[in-house]
Amino acid sequence: GGGSTTSGKKMHIHGGTSIGTGYSGSTVATNGLGVEGSVGIGIANPTVKLQVAGGGAIIGTTGSGSNNRTLTVLGDNTTQISFGSYPYDWSPAIQIQNNDNTKMTWISAGGSGAYSSSNARYLTNGSGLDFYTGSNAFAATITSSATMGIGVSTPASTLHSAGAIRTGIPAGGLGGASASNGALVFNNASNSNTVTLQTSATSSSYTLNLPTGQGGANAVLVNDGSGNLSWGTHYHPWENMGTNVQQVCAGGSAATDYEWGVTYNNSSPILRVTCNGWNSGQRVCTYPPYPTGDSEPFTWGGACWIWGTASTWDDACPIAAHSYYGQDANGRYNMTGGNGCSNLPTVYRRRL
């Protein structure tokens, strides 16, 4: 016993002491111990200042099972790396805090006992959480107000991405979204093909409100002009195509994708027309026939326009010659006189 004759221990030093030739004559704290070299516990040749082998170390405890059990490493400017029990009662956790203790991070594996239902937790206090790549480039952030930015340091919504987003949900789901071109991508059932909904260049923002039900067979969405969509019938409006009647027989999409109509001598109604070849040329006639004449008994008939034929009727007409057609006493239809080259109709079409 150093300084004591009644210690009852293998070694008992009363007061402070020091170990090491360099510490000779040094003042040691009351009841303290100063060691110049390395300390090994369970190891004869420690390679660091304090090395423990063959068992654990408990530093800073007020008793077995205490939730005050901690291990703290202080930096030169009081930066701390601590091992403790926050945020759950006696659950191992690691705390890292800044120099002035205004910001800290805790990593906990979760609680036990009364807190066994608690999940593992990564907690920040005093700041949000930023993520950087290996090249120290900003990648993402979670703010203290619970918003997340991917490639955006100040997210404007709960989830804010600077680029395209692709989900990993099962086949047939949402394939992704693009912030650069305003598109939503939907996968088919096997994820082999996609359908993309994309906005066009707009002069202002607008909202489309979907109807409450799914609608009936062959129904289409109709906009009331205020963005309120409802289910309506399938139809396309008539388009005014000018006075060149020859386009009715132009072929291709004009003949197969549209129905055609005309007005003449009046503004309405639009009379449907058909095109067929006649006398080596083309003939457009109104159909079905309608009552003609100004007196009774009336006959059924209509109007035709011809061009490129072997007849002399249309020789002087740059576009087409007008002719009436009517039903004779035998029920047959014949073209009769007309108004020559000047009575061209206004031509309309609408998509089928």
Image (spheres, grey):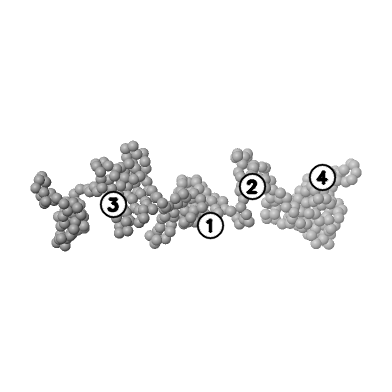
Label 2 vs label 3: CA separation? Answer: 62 Å
Left/right placement of residue 22 relative to residue 102 reads left
Q: Disc 3 designates what residue?
A: 72
Label 2 vs label 1: CA separation? Answer: 24 Å
Q: Residue furthest right?
A: 295
Between 106 and 305, which is closer to the camera in this rendering? 106
Q: Position of residue 150 (x, y in %)?
A: 46, 54
| Residue type at tag 3 | Thr
The residue mark sitting in front, 3 or 1, is 3
Q: Indicate which disc, 3 or 1, sits on the residue closer to the N terminus.
A: 3
Q: Disc 2 designates what residue?
A: 227
Between 70 and 32, which is closer to the camera in this rendering? 32
| Residue type at tag 2 | Gly
The residue mark sitting in front, 1 or 4, is 1
User: SS of the residue at dot 3?
Assistant: strand
Q: Disc 4 designates what residue?
A: 290
Image height check: is 65 above or below 303?
above
Q: Disc 1 designates what residue?
A: 180
Write the residue at 74% across / 54% down: 240
Rate crowding at label 4 as few (under 14), some (14 to 19) or many (20 or more) other CA atoms within 10 Å: some
Q: Indicate which disc, 4 or 3, sits on the residue closer to the N terminus.
A: 3
Q: Position of residue 292 (x, y in %)?
A: 85, 46
Write the residue at 50% across / 46% down: 173
Query: Pointer 4 and pointer 2: residues touching (CB < 8 Å)?
Result: no
Label 4 vs label 3: CA separation? Answer: 101 Å
| Residue type at tag 4 | Tyr
Q: Position of residue 157 (x, y in %)?
A: 51, 50
| Residue type at tag 1 | Ser
